[in-house]
């Protein structure tokens, strides 16, 4: 028998086997147990998170006559036929290749007929966002008058591309990215079952490289297995995932923080020679330094074993540079990342960057004394002289490159100073934020602020340390918006699917109300509020100019409530003038007035 890919062989056949989607699977099982089955579902989420697997399990569960706790038996004829894709009543359609109106019309015509073998006919339409407008309209007609005993399951990685008219007729489930921990556990389980030897570190490297997709994790694992003769070794995992340069990155880090720029330049060349492109090098370096920063904050904040490095490595790196230096490094990296997008000479930029990183000054730390500050030797002086010459030369080259804008893909006439805090890949979910803003009240925010510490105490230690740099900034009865001081911690929180679940559960226990938690980076928050207010015409009601009036604690708004008094002093300072309180202020609480200052 030919080799079958792991993700096929180990495709989940029961809800319990779906990794990292407990909320979704529990709800689906409950629906089946209580016979509350809807006629249309939307499964939304990143690729490889189990959407189509869940759809097939659901198709079995609604049709299996030997259910156990909402799970299909996987033994009966119906279950087996669905597993093998041989049941005529369960129809899988890939909208990416069938995006025509005809195909959907075909569904409409055939959906009218009762199922032949099973109780329910189930249509699973994958990548449904690819349907053409005409096809969506045809689908909508079917959803408006759903035939009896027909269930539609629409799966998509891009729910925002689906017309609202469709969304409003389906029950929606959001699948989350799989955490590295969950992917690791699943691979461990599979390898144990297969009795294959593995190095745990190798599994962590794979789990991280998969970036939230279980299918990707298993595909990489497949490659590693074929690479190393049915063994999973760290070195092969590093090669397959292209993380071979992790050790080199560490070397580079030590060299720039020890101001050994000449060595660092060589290491950088080694990294590029190992096949890494310039942008990827910068991205990896940013996430590398981010890990060091997190480790400094609290070693529990990162899963050391998942990085391919050791605790000892991290201790040394943490000692090599204080946080202030690390932040400057990230700034420099972000800056160069922007500039590099418009150049055809990335190597020049990387060389300048390397020298620049090597020059970032730090306060002497105990660890820095590991390399005793002896007077520069002759060799050192020679190196320094060489470096200075190199820098001059590089600077000249950069100037030349920048002086010839016509040759480059036109960089629009933007101010030269790019906002440095802006990180690429920072994704803010406006679709989740705006509904909360729409119903936000000051009272809700004060309530959440009041029980924030109690909420934190319900979380695990790593989760708590991550949230130390966050605070609730807006709240409604349906949700809470939490802002993070640093974009990279925001990213860290976004990647932690268990964190959101714990917070939402904790909030429900504390308030008795179900609230969605949404994260934003703090530096994006003023803009988000400003745009919301502008788009909803709330600013028009703001008394012109007057908001610039100084606010003192003696000038509290007439509406000042007891709740206001609980506000921390810093927030109170931002309370607006004693004018009639604006609509915006009523909605979001006084912090909103800050917008006028931005
Ligand atoms: Zn069955």
Image (cartoon, rainbow, N blue to C red):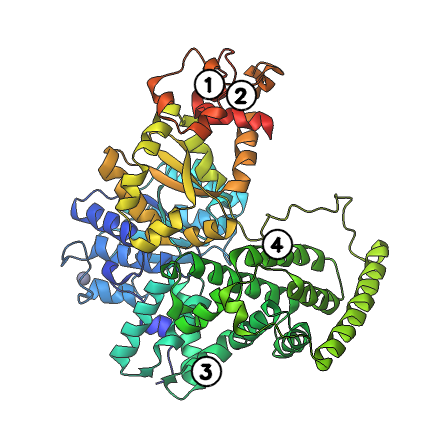
Mark 4: C-beta under 8 Å from nearest atom of ligand 1: no
Image quarter for residue 339? bottom right
Q: Which mark is residue 553?
A: 1
Task: Name which of mark 1 and mark 2 comes first in the sequence.
Answer: 2
Comes first in the chain, label 3 or label 1? 3
* Mark whose residue sits in front, 3 or 4: 4
Dot 2: element: helix
Residue 494 place in picture, x, y as percent: 43, 51
Which dot marks residue 235? 3
Q: Is residue 43 visible?
A: no
Quarter of the image where one finds residue 514: top left
For the N terminus, which image quadrant? bottom left
Q: Circle 2 sits on which residue?
A: 538
Quarter where residue 202 is shown: bottom left
Instruction: Tell me the mark number nearer the camera, choosing from 1 and 2.
Output: 1
Q: Residues within 10 Å of mark 4 (few under 14, many from 20)?
A: some
Which tag, 2 or 3, sits closer to the chain's start?
A: 3
Q: Residues within 10 Å of mark 2 (few under 14, many from 20)?
A: some
- The first of marks 2 and 4 along the sequence is 4
- The residue shown at (38%, 70%) is 305
């Amino acid at each position: 028998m030919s080799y079958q890919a792991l993700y096929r062989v180990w495709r989940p056949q029961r809800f319990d086997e779906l990794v990292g989607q407990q909320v979704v699977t529990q709800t689906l099982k409950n629906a089946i147990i209580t016979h509350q089955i809807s006629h249309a579902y939307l499964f939304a989420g990143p690729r490889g998170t189990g959407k189509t697997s869940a759809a097939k399990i659901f198709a079995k569960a609604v049709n299996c006559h030997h259910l156990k706790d909402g799970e299909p038996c996987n033994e009966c004829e119906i279950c087996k036929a669905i597993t093998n894709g041989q049941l005529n009543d369960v129809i899988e359609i890939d909208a990416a290749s069938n995006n025509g109106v005809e195909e959907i019309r075909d569904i409409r015509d055939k959906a009218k007929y009762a199922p032949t073998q099973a109780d329910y006919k189930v249509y699973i339409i994958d990548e449904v966002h690819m349907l053409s407008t005409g096809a969506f309209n045809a689908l909508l007609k079917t959803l408006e008058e759903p035939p009896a005993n027909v269930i539609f399951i629409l799966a998509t990685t891009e729910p925002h591309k689906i017309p609202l008219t469709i969304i409003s007729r389906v029950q929606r489930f959001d699948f989350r990215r799989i955490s590295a921990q969950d992917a690791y556990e699943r691979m461990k389980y599979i390898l144990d079952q297969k009795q294959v030897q593995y190095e745990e570190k190798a599994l962590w490297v794979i789990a991280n490289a998969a970036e939230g997709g279980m299918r990707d994790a298993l595909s990489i694992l497949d490659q590693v297995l074929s690479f190393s003769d049915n063994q999973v070794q760290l070195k092969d995992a590093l090669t397959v995932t292209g993380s071979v340069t992790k050790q080199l990155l560490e070397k580079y880090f030590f060299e720039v923080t020890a101001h050994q720029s000449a060595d660092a330049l060589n290491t950088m060349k080694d990294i590029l020679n190992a096949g890494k492109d310039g942008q990827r090098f910068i991205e990896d370096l940013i996430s590398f330094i981010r890990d060091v920063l997190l480790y400094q904050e609290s070693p529990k904040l990162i899963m050391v074993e998942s990085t391919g490095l050791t605790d000892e490595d991290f201790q040394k790196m943490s000692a090599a540079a204080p946080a202030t230096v690390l932040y400057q490094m990230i700034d420099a990296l972000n800056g160069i990342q922007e500039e590099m997008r418009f150049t055809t000479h990335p190597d020049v930029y990387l060389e300048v960057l390397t020298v620049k990183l090597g020059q970032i000054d730090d306060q002497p730390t105990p660890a820095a004394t590991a390399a005793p500050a002896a007077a520069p030797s002759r060799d050192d002086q020679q190196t320094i002289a060489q470096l200075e010459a190199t820098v001059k030369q590089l600077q000249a080259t950069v100037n030349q490159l920048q002086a010839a804008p016509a040759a480059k893909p036109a960089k629009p006439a933007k101010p030269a100073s790019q906002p440095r805090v802006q990180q690429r890949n920072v994704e803010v979910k406006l679709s989740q934020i705006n509904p909360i803003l729409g119903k936000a009240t000051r009272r809700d925010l004060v309530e959440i602020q009041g029980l924030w510490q109690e909420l934190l105490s319900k979380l695990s230690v790593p989760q708590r340390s991550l949230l130390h740099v966050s605070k609730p900034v807006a709240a409604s009865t349906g949700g809470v918006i939490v802002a993070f001081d640093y974009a990279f911690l925001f990213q860290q929180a976004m990647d932690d699917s268990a964190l959101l679940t714990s917070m939402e559960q904790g909030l429900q226990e504390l308030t008795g109300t179900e609230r969605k938690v949404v994260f934003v980076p703090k530096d994006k928050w003023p803009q988000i509020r400003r745009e919301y207010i502008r788009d909803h015409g709330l600013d028009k009601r703001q008394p012109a100019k007057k908001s610039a009036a100084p606010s003192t604690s003696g000038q509290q708004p007439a509406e000042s409530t007891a709740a206001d008094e609980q506000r921390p002093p810093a927030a109170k300072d931002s309370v607006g003038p004693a004018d009639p309180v604006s609509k915006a202020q009523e909605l979001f609480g006084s912090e909103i007035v800050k917008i006028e200052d931005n």
